[in-house]
Image (cartoon, coloured by chain):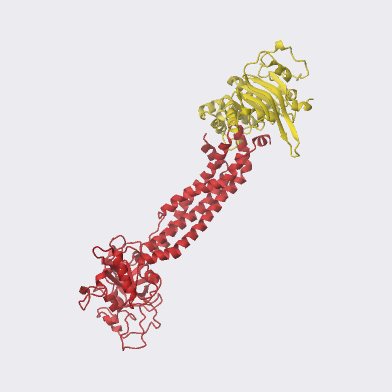
Amino acid sequence: MRTGDLWREREIYTAVPQPLNPPVKKPVFDHPLPPPDTIPPMATPVLELIDVRKSFTMPGGEQVNILDIGSFQLAADEHCALEGRSGSGKSTLLNVISGIMRPDAGRVIIDGIDIARLDEARRDRVRADRLGLVFQQFNLLPGFTALENVLVAMSFGSGRPDRDRAVRLLDAVGLRHRLDHKPSALSVGQQQRVAVARALANRPRAVLADEPTASIDPAHQQQVIDLLRTTCTEQGVALLVVTHAADVAGQFPRRIRLEDFNRAAAGHRS
Amino acid sequence: MTLLGIACRNIRQRLLTSLLTALSLALGVALVVATLVTGGIVKQAFESGSGLGYNMIVGAKGSPLQLVLNSVYLVSKPIENISWDFYQQFLPAAERPDGVDGTFAASTKTAVPICMGDYYRGFRVIGTNTAYFDRLTIGDGRPFAFSGGRNFRNDEFFGGVLGATVAAKLGLKPGDPFAPTHGADDGKVHDPFTVTGVLARTDTPVDRGVFVNMEGFYLQDGHAKPVEGEEASGQRTADSGEDADGSREHGNREHGKQGQAPLPFAQREVTALLLDTASLPGLPPELMAMGLRTAINEGRDGQAALPIAEIRLLLDLFVRPLELLLLLVTTLVVIVSAIGILVSMVGSSLERSRDVAIMRALGARRSHVLVVVLIEAVLLAVGGGLAGWVLGHLLVGAIAPLITTNAGVSASIFSAAPGAELLLVPFLVVLAILAALLPALAAYRTDVAKWLSS
């Protein structure tokens, strides 16, 4: 446990477990942090970032720093909302965590494995086996049925595709009767349910959701958050949701702002 | 779900494009298969001319290839005739009126004379004797068989035997009369012959032949050689079909009627001899044939040609280059079709890039997406290739009657060029993989982060 790192993140840490549909709270980023002795000890982290830096070279040759993170941890059963403004590096951070991008420096430890040191193929395997991704646009494969979308994800993991488990996952998200429907025949909410089931296909240690409510109407937003949290709780999976919606972030027991611990995005802090 | 399953799903997702691509490939393959099979049939048509119970043709001096084409394959025009006396030189004493062995009798096992120059409704009429069907074979030593009737007897001057194609096409059966025409289909109509038998199909040029007793053939108008002192201007041209005046008679018209005496030997000629050379104990048969050939060619009376050698020459000089050219053209068609795969896949690369990015985000490795694209291409190639293979054989089946009639060999939907056809599928697979490499590499290099954020 690196409490100093947690202090730097300036988190709003809530010790009491939250209901699945907690009332929306106004973010209180500027409140003074609680004294160290009130912070509960964090369980073994499933995700840990240490001195991670990532920059891009612009077409004009200019080097732009996107990420400069001293430390970040996500415990094995933790649900966390990560807020940030546009351009603060949220998507880059998710790409680095999921191994799609390799950081320029630092360590990205997923379930004890430093993927920053791995080659691309091994990062792909870690992503397939230990992480589940949920996207803003759901990103279901349009030519595949709901069941096949889950099975495809399984086929890239280390285990054999398990049709029974895929059916159980879809059943758990209320889509037992839509197994053979293609995405085009599903409602927006149903598509997002398939995406959640797919994210859990390979028994991941953590689910990373990138703006999962951004492209759906407010009526469905709450359902999606409830679904994500409930399902991840049932499966014992950590959840990191990237969002720019304060009301969404307010429902999570842990809520952080990227600008607060990403030195490269400090200029974006409001 | 396996990579194969994913590839199948991708094909189904782009069903119309995939079907059109496969169809384009199928048409190319159908052309190749049809070319290969018909090329094989043509070669078979020529090669069927060997192993017929004779290994040498003796005819008038001139082109040996023309002699072979005319005598064996019943195409092209006869060169000239050889004299009756020269023919007699190949006969043993027992078959000669003078009871003395001919000069070449010792080297000859069988000598079958043929006389040509007449036609019957587009088919060659060949005057010969009973030995043609009694002593020659249809290949590999198999004797001639009759599907109806029998061979004509030597004393049936106006008896005839029809090849299977002739009988089938003209609807003739034993007992039916037929009257050949002189020199060409529109030439003077000869006295009628009677069908004594119809040959079972041989898949050789014999199927296209109308065989008549040469005694009756000699008795037709214009078929007798003018004897010395008789009408100096009466040049003998009957057998070559060059009779300038079809109405001109040759002084022996009275012999052209049934029951008349045979034509005197002095007025006879033959177009060619089909020879089976003898083989002496201890000597290879080829040596005997070579010796006889040299002896004949050194003389003035005629020439000897080896059908197998001439046909091999013809195949090497003309048929194989033509076959190669056709194969090249059709192969280009297949390559163009393979480029169709490339175009189709590049065309759908935008759609594919998003799917690839999603799969990569789910943990697919670059090698996975590369293999999926290649499997798609191979599936299209194999599917299109098999459809084309079936289509090609259907095409051959459709033109089979035409081939059978004109080439004298049986062709059907099941005719095949096994060696080349077996190579076709691996060739297609390699071609498809090459064509799919570009889109596969594009998929391999897909920028996941860019596509997921777009």
In the rendered image, which quarter contains the C terminus of chain B? top right
Shown colour of chain A = yellow
Q: Residue furthest front?
A: B282
Residue B192 visible somewhere in the drawing: yes
Q: Residue furthest top?
A: A37
Q: Position of residue B119 (x, y in %)?
A: 37, 73
Q: Which image quadrant is residue B184 in?
A: bottom left
Nearer the observer, B5 or B191: B5
Please determine whether, in this image, residue B89 is positioned above or below residue B168: below
Seen in the image, is B370 located left or right of residue B412? right
Between A264 and B346, the residue placed more toward the observer is A264
Of the pair B263 and A33, the residue shown nearer to us: A33
In depth, the one of A73 and B373 nearer the eye is: A73
**Relative side of A119 to B160, left or right:** right
User: Which color is chain B depicted in?
Assistant: red
Residue sitting at 74 percent across and 29 percent down? A88
Q: In the rendered image, is residue B384 in sight?
A: no
The quadrant where residue A221 appears: top right
Q: Quadrant of residue A204?
A: top right
Image coordinates for residue B350, horizontal then vertical, percent: 64, 42
Instruction: Find residue B424 and report its horizontal and vertical position in percent.
Output: 47, 50
x then y, percent, for residue A229: 64, 22
Q: Is residue B385 above or below residue A220?
A: below
Numbered marks: total: 0
Q: Residue at x 38, y 79 (%)?
A: B188
- Residue B28 shown left or right of residue A110 in the figure: left
- Relative to B285, is A144 above or below? above
